[in-house]
Amino acid sequence: LQRFRPWTPVGSMPWHWVLGRTGAQVLAIGQGQTLTEFGYRSDTALAFSVSSRLGHQVGVNDFFTRLHAYARARSDGTMLAEWWSERRCAAQWGDLARPDAFGRWIQPR
């Protein structure tokens, strides 16, 4: 992993973490791919450190990780069955819809 703290004019922000080259290599090997085929680029991974969308993306990820944590704490079959990124949604639906993410929630009655 690689870490960074976003700039703020006053005080400090919490550490943020992105996948580093070694972690990407491990995931690529696990999927039978080279690092290039896997699509990892460190400059792209760290670009979020200066992105105006960082706060929004952190909010979206926080929402879904809280759903996942809630489901894991239950024993009744509740689950976050799918969690798609904005990029995957755009690839799936193009200009028809532009959601920040997509999730499929399963909760027995």
Image (tube, helix red, strand yellow):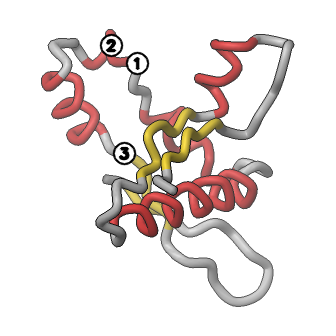
Is 1 on the left or on the right of 97, as rendered?
left
Which numbered disc covers residue 36? 2
Question: Do tag 1 and tag 3 residues touch (Cβ < 8 Å)?
Answer: no
Q: Residue furthest right?
A: 96
- Mark 1: secondary structure: loop
Q: Position of residue 101 (x, y in %)?
A: 66, 38
For mark 3, does the 10 Å Cα neighbourhood hold few (<14), some (14 to 19), or many (20 or more) residues? some
Q: Residues within 10 Å of mark 1 (few under 14, many from 20)?
A: few
Q: Which mark is residue 52?
A: none
**Considering depth in this image, is 16 or 89 the residue closer to the camera?**
89
Expressed as whole percent of the image width and height from the top left, the position of residue 98 reads 81, 27
Q: CA distance from mark 2 to mark 1?
A: 5 Å
As drawn, 52 above or below 94: below
Q: Nearer the viewer, residue 15 or 92?
A: 92
What is the spatial separation of the Cα atoms under label 1 and label 3, in whole angstroms? 12 Å
Which circle's residue, 2 or 3, is located before the other in the chain?
3
Image point (76%, 49%), residue name:
53
| Label 2 residue SS | helix
On screen, residue 29 versus residue 10, left or right, reads left
Residue 76 versus residue 99: which sits nearer the camera?
A: 76
- Three-letter amino acid code at the position of disc 2: Thr
Q: Residue at x 59, y 23 (%)?
A: 88
Indicate the position of residue 31 as horizontal and vertical percent values.
Answer: 20, 19
Q: Which quadrant of the view contains residue 71?
A: bottom left
Q: Is residue 32 above or below residue 78?
A: above
Tell me, yes or no, whether the two marked residues, 2 and 1, touch with CB atoms within 8 Å: yes
Q: Residue at x 66, y 54 (%)?
A: 60
The residue carrying pointer 2 sits among few (fewer than 14), some (14 to 19) or many (20 or more) residues within 10 Å by Cα, namely few
Q: Which residue is mark 3?
A: 19
